Image: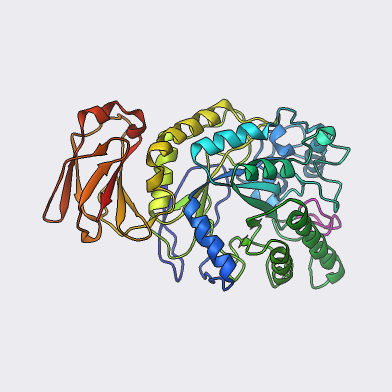
Amino acid sequence: MKPIVKGICCLAFSWAALDAVAQQHDMSADYVRPTDPLVLRNIDEWRDLKFGLFMHWGPYSQWGVVESWSLCPEDQSWTQRSGEFKDDYFGYVKAYENLQTTFNPTRFNPDRWVEAAKYAGMKYMVFTTKHHDGFAMFDTQQSDYRITHPKTPFSVHPHADVTKVLFDAFRNEGFRIGAYFSKPDWHSDDYWWRYFPPKDRNVNYDTQKYPERWGRFKEFTFKQIEELMTNYGEIDILWLDGGQVQPPKQDIDMPHIAHMARSNQPGIIIVDRTVPGPYENYVTPEQQIPEEPLSVPWESNLTMGDSFSYVPNDRYKTSRELIHMLIKIVSRGGNFLLNIAPRPDGEWDEVAYERLREIGDWMAVHGEAIYGTRPLAASTEEGYYYTQRKDGMTSYAFCLSGNGDVLPISMEFTLPQGKTVRHVELLGVGAVDWRVVDGRITVGIPDGAKKLKPLTYAKVLKLQH
């Protein structure tokens, strides 16, 4: 982990950045609180969920490259091209787009993903219906560049519309559903016009000079989002990526899109990420965890491996690392959206299932300290983090376990906010002995607790006030 510090007006904080092969996005500075009571209610309920599943998946997984980014000249420095066409940009683009003709994830089994995510304690999911490369993982009628087109081998499979199949499978098990959608579309001739070579992530022509072409792109974008909002059941989150697409030069008319979305999906949470204003209902630090609580709804999206998309032999984080990330995020008032990248055959690596099982074992004991909680201003003693119930009558103190998994004989820390205590439990064990002296509480750890494996990642004290 490499600490970096970035100052943002209005919200002062520093970031702890994680090493990863992915783009990082700064958090928007000027949060605008929604006024729609239904949206506000849904945001509050979403904040209670705490833990979600993210998935980046598309034909690019066949090459094991960072999703979409190798197409963009601006990002060549960190996502270099490889293979036969690495020195021929236009040949590379043609070969990349031809991946559509070989994408055939016949091992795709959404029920196994749902079972694993549910056991891990995840409560919502966000799926990449279309990334920046423009390939639609849903049955859009606006483009042939889609998984259900006859050019794609998987189009004849009963689960060809993977977005619909995934949304239905997760929704049937009680998950809230999020649709990731890229506003830029690098396949569209109305975004990256082939008359000009692309230079960076932005539209590659002057939208003021060619308003008809930009108008076609706006209509194309609107219709694709409308398809998602009308043909795919109840959607809880519209998660829009590509913050460069915003006024004045790349205005896709977000008020029009938001009105349509909420006409079809009342109260839907809209995340026009990194674009300050009324359509960024929560903020989304990427591959980062704020070091302090934030005053706005937020979600850290981080990867289980090093990449958002599938990379062979990726380095998966340990269960300990992932549980510690979850604790830090939740104790600072955020949600944890954990990305798992499906392979080109439509499966996850087995290590992903192993991680989710181990997280689920820990959550089965400690979930009450995670779900439905809010941050609690507390001492900054190393290794201790705190949450509290909304009524303030119960708080939880997390003590992170080190790599040695050796539980201490006792725990001692300053009581959060000087609260008085009337009862203490060690989750997974029960009532424990405790005493308070000069605002510090000391809690004894029973010998039997040292044999409980779920307590080795982090143990949690429940303090009743």
In the image shown, does 209 or 281 lie closer to the viewer? 281
Q: Main secondary structure of the magenta part?
A: loop
Say whether residue 196 is magenta: yes
Residue shown at the point (67%, 54%) measured from the top left: 235
| Residue 276 in sight in this render | no
In the image shown, does 417 or 365 lie closer to the viewer? 365
Instruction: Left or right? Give the position of 172 relative to 366.
Output: right
Report x, y in % for residue 245: 69, 63
Quadrant of res 62: top right
Quadrant of res 210: bottom right
Magenta residues, start to end: 186-198
Report x, y in % for residue 77: 62, 46
Q: Is residue 421 above or below residue 281?
A: above
Quadrant, the N terminus: top left
Instruction: Left or right? Give the position of 362 relative to 272.
Output: left
Quadrant, the C terminus: bottom left
